[in-house]
Amino acid sequence: MKRNVAPDFLAKTGVKHMQEKIDLRSAENGEEFANLAAALFIEKLEALDNPLVVLPTGATPLGMYHALATHHAHRRDLWEKMRFLALDEYLGLRRDDPRLFYGWLRREFLDRVGVPESRCTAFQSDAADPRAEAERIKTWLQQNGPIDIAVLGLGTNGHIAFNEPGSAFDSTVRTVSLTMESRKANAAYWGDIALVPETALTLGLGDLGRARHSILLVSGAHKTAILDRVLKGPVTTDVPATYLRDRANVTVIADKAALGLR
Ligand code: PGA
């Protein structure tokens, strides 16, 4: 089913090939963006038993989480059957640190709809041996995967989770160093780049590439240039999100600002 494909964008750019693989939907405004994303996520959840889900942190998905908590929190049938796996996490933060991505997701979404902690698998930021921690999650995913629904955000440098430019398309769970661009983008949340850790744990593009459904959320005029490269530029590890171009069942939900339509 293709609803709300971005016709202006496609007509303007003459992109045809991309449309064959990626289902592109455009939203007029923030509310429509949030509601489209929430509705698609619910539709995918409803269709699956025991779905394994990854979810993004950041400004982009906040409206979707709010819409889900406001309008769909009563769907206990969905929230109690889903399994959550963390996409990525900073390294070196204590368990009670407010910067933890998993803590952020619990506050903004998981606790608000009632996804039980017992159904959530997250990275331990304070692991004494980060490589062993990456191995632990890798083994967990081998035994419990693949991911059924990957909801993703897009970095201004094209990253997906913390797969920074140059990440191999077959990369797996690992420790990574963050680029200055990502650290600067994340500093917006904490006020100072010194508060953004330099290393992290992330799922790999190979793990995400095996997801049965992927939903990429892109919002804001500051993402127009990178979204253009993701949808129409060469498929290259310089733009990690271009791995999605070769995958089936990929939906991009973008607002008009991100599509450069206003
Ligand atoms: P943002 O982050 O939603 O805050 O723009 C996206 C990302 O870096 O994945």
Image: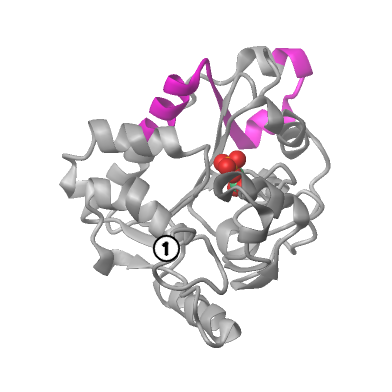
Q: Indicate how the structure is coloured in the image.
A: one colour
- Among the 4 quarters of the image, the one containing residue 256: top right
Question: Could you say where residue 68 lies in the image, as x and y percent from the top left?
Answer: 31, 36
Question: Could you say where residue 18 lies in the image, as x and y percent from the top left?
Answer: 70, 32
Eyeballing the image, is 204 above or below 245?
below
Eyeballing the image, is 46 above or below 228?
below
The residue lying at 42 percent from left, 27 percent from top is: 36
Eyeballing the image, is 256 above or below 79?
above
Question: Could you say where residue 213 lies in the image, as x and y percent from the top left?
Answer: 48, 47
Residue 89 seen by the camera = yes
From the image, which quarter does the N terminus lie in? top left
Range of magenta residues: 11-40
Q: Nearer the viewer, residue 80 or 222?
A: 222
In the rendered structure, which amino acid carries the disc numbered 1?
Answer: Leu
Eyeballing the image, is 69 above or below 177?
above
Q: Which secondary structure, mark 1?
A: strand
- Ligand 1 in which quarter: top right
Q: Would residue 23 be counted in the magenta stretch?
A: yes
Question: Could you say where residue 126 lies in the image, as x and y percent from the top left?
Answer: 49, 78
The residue lying at 71 percent from left, 13 percent from top is: 11
Q: Which residue is mark 1?
A: 85
